[in-house]
Amino acid sequence: MFETILICTLAAVAANVPFVTGRLFGLLSLARKHFGWQLLEWLVYYLLLLGVARLLEGRVSDVHPQNWQFYATTLALFVVLAWPGFVWRYFWRKPGI
């Protein structure tokens, strides 16, 4: 149960981080972080989250093999979780902030 809550919380935070911060991966300060960098950072966070989930699953039981449907579904859920950060960045935030 704890692992599920942890993964869901990490997914919600990781999906929105690229849109909330102006730094690339929290390290490099960019003058203007355009959508391409945000998309790359978002995809890397998705892959890292898959790795963490696989590690946690391996601690609890045997890791089940996954097909493409699993990855398509989790990617779609990650897109939905990123919606608040995307809306804040591109629809609510004033230019120049």
Image (spheres, helix red, strand yellow):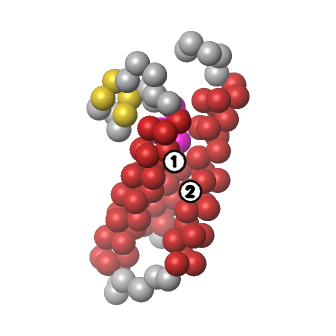
Q: Is residue 8 above or below residue 67?
A: above
Q: 79 or 35: which is nearer to us?
A: 35
Q: Which residue in the structure is indicated by mark 2?
A: 78
The residue closer to the viewer here, 4 or 94, is 94
Give the tally of numbered discs: 2
Question: Is there CB contact under 8 Å for labels 2 and 1?
Answer: yes
**Residue 10, image x and y in percent?**
45, 52
Which residue is denoted by mark 1 in the rendering?
15
The answer to which image quadrant residue 47 occupies is: bottom left
Left or right relative to 40: residue 74 = right
- Vertical arrangement, residue 67 with respect to residue 80, above or below: below
Residue beneath the point at 51% across and 48% down? 15
Residue stretch rendered in magenta on the structure:
16-20
Q: Relative to 2, is 35 on the left or the right?
A: right
Q: Amino acid at mark 1?
A: Ala
Distance between the alpha carbons at the discs numbered 2 and 1: 6 Å
Q: With respect to residue 60, does 74 lie above or below?
A: above
Q: Determine the secondary structure under disc 1.
A: helix
Density class for disc 2 (Cα within 10 Å; few <14, some 14-19, many ≥20) is many
Q: Of all residues shown, which one is farthest toward the top?
A: 96
Task: Identify which residue is drawn at 37% across, 23% down.
Answer: 30
Q: Is residue 52 left or right of residue 97?
A: left
Residue 86, percent across and down?
62, 38
Does the stretch in magenta take in 89?
no
Q: Residue at x 56, y 12 (%)?
A: 96
Counting from the top left corner in percent of width and height, residue 74 is at: 55, 66
Q: The residue tagged with tag 2: helix, strand or loop?
A: helix
* Relative to 73, residue 46 above or below: above
Give, as a three-letter code, the residue at label 2. Answer: Phe
Q: Residue furthest right?
A: 91
Q: Earlier in the sequence, mark 2 or mark 1?
A: 1
Task: Residue 78: give x, y in percent of width and height.
Answer: 56, 56
